[in-house]
Amino acid sequence: MTEVRVEAHGLTKRYGDFTAVDGLDFTIEPGAVLGFLGPNGAGKSTTMKMLTGFLAPSAGTAIINGHDIVTDSLAARRCMGYLPEGAPAYGEMPVCRFLEFVARARGYSGAAAGKMAGLAMERLNLDHLPGQVIDTLSKGYKRRVGLAQAILHDPEILILDEPTDGLDPNQKHEVRRLIRQMSQSRIIIISTHILEEVQALCNRVMIIAEGRLLVDDSPAGLLARSRYHNAVTMVVEQAERVASVLSELQQTRKVEIRDGELTVFPADGALLFDVISEQVRRHGWNVSELRLEAGRMDEVFLQVTGGEGQP
């Protein structure tokens, strides 16, 4: 039995003098839900297109379940489901006919093709729209059709480019639940701009910029890089006076007031939450919110990618 595994070896894509993806090396194993992050133009979609065989690399290669995407592309693609950016489909086709077409392209025929299309529609809550023409669907339903075709053949590897783009909050919840259910023995790679989605779904994160891999870590590991990690944030009356008191604590490194919130940053290794809670009780401060910060993903993302607005 072939081991489920994705490998990239020196994966590179050039367009003339411009290098979109620059020598990526990584390995992904079953159970991984990988969040692929980067600023616009970082090379995320280009990398996914090379992994799926949609684009040929300029150098290097990817190995999908032991199959080289360059020299054994068809076998590699059989292992994967792919949702491209924008979820392209044949817009003039009804939902069911399109999914049956995809099923036949995946090797199913006759009643089996209809059965697989029906199961995919059921999983994405499309079974009430089998005859509706795709071009008449909302953006959210078109996205669901795209997801249905990606999972239709129950692939071992799913590559999803912005899977919840255009979905309302309820639809996002349903799709995230489906991804969690499917992740147990599979590899799922998600490209997204939504940092909340990374924290909700992923157990591994890669950040790329200018085509280079900058970080490969868990979401918890990324949050631990944040200057807000283990800080305590509060919304309190007379924040300036409270800040003056808290800044004198030996466990405090720094106190900051920003956007109506007061944040206390710990000295090395200090655990602040209980200390500050005791100060609140002792002084009788009127606190409407008090929370321990795990860290802030957006701040880490900006720091890693060299974005503006860094402290």
Image (cartoon, helix red, strand yellow):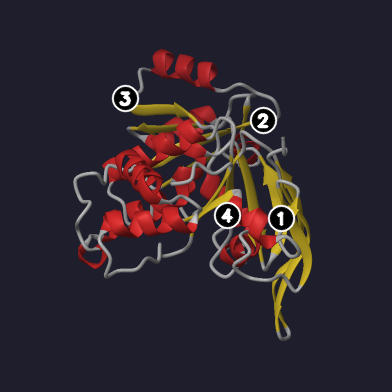
Residue sitting farthest toward the bottom: 16
Q: How far apart are marks 1 and 3 (CA)?
A: 43 Å
Q: Which of marks 1 and 3 is nearer the N terminus?
A: 1
**SS label for mark 1:** strand
**SS label for mark 3:** loop
Residue 245: assigned label: none
Residue 124 in the image: state x and y as whole percent: 33, 43
Res. 199 in view:
yes
Comparing marks 1 and 3, which lies closer to the viewer? 1
What residue appears at the point 65 percent right and 23 percent down from the top-left corner?
A: 270
Disc 4 crowd rating (10 Å Cα; few below 14, some 14-19, many 20+) is: many
Res. 311 in view:
no
Q: Distance between the residues labelled 3 and 2?
A: 25 Å
Q: What residue type is labelled 4?
A: Leu
Q: What residue type is labelled 2?
A: Ala
Residue 94 in the image: state x and y as whole percent: 25, 61
Q: How far apart are marks 4 and 2 (CA)?
A: 31 Å
The residue wearing badge 1 is: 214
Q: How many labels were placed on the picture?
A: 4
Q: Is 13 positioned to the left or the right of 237 in the image?
A: right
Q: Do the residues labelled 4 and 2 touch (CB within 8 Å)?
A: no
Q: What residue type is labelled 3?
A: Asn
Residue 37: assigned label: 4
Q: Which of marks 1 and 2 is nearer the N terminus?
A: 1
Image quadrant assignment for residue 135: bottom left
The residue wearing badge 2 is: 267
Comparing marks 1 and 2, which lies closer to the viewer? 1
